[in-house]
Image: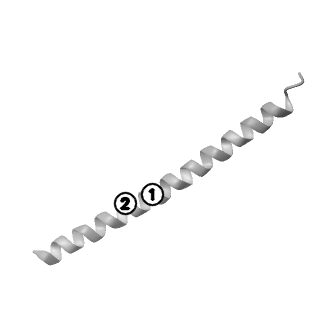
Amino acid sequence: MLKKFAYVMLASSWLLLTACNTMSGAGKDIQKGGEAIENSADKNKGY
């Protein structure tokens, strides 16, 4: 029983860690997209 519990805990922690990395990557992608929009807006201010 304890061995099964250890496997479940290991799998759960692995899933949580991969989810954190995925969210971190998505946040960086969204930030880069926002920077590109901001740069484009700055270039076109004079129009």
Local SS, label 2: helix
> Where's residue 47, x and y in %?
89, 21
Instruction: Specify the farthest residue to the top.
Output: 47
Q: Which residue is mark 1?
A: 20
Mark 2 vs mark 1, CA separation in Å: 6 Å
- The three-letter amino acid code for the residue at tag 2 is Leu
Pointer 1 local density, CA inside 10 Å: few below 14, some 14–19, many at least 20 = few
Which quadrant holds residue 13? bottom left
Question: Residue drawn 61% across and 49% down?
Answer: 29
- In the image, is 2 to the left or to the right of 34? left
Q: Are marks 2 and 1 in contact (CB under 8 Å)?
A: yes
Q: Please say which color scheme the image uses.
A: one colour
- The three-letter amino acid code for the residue at tag 1 is Cys
Instruction: Specify the farthest residue to the bottom.
Output: 3
Quarter of the figure that contains the N terminus: bottom left
Q: Which residue is mark 2?
A: 16
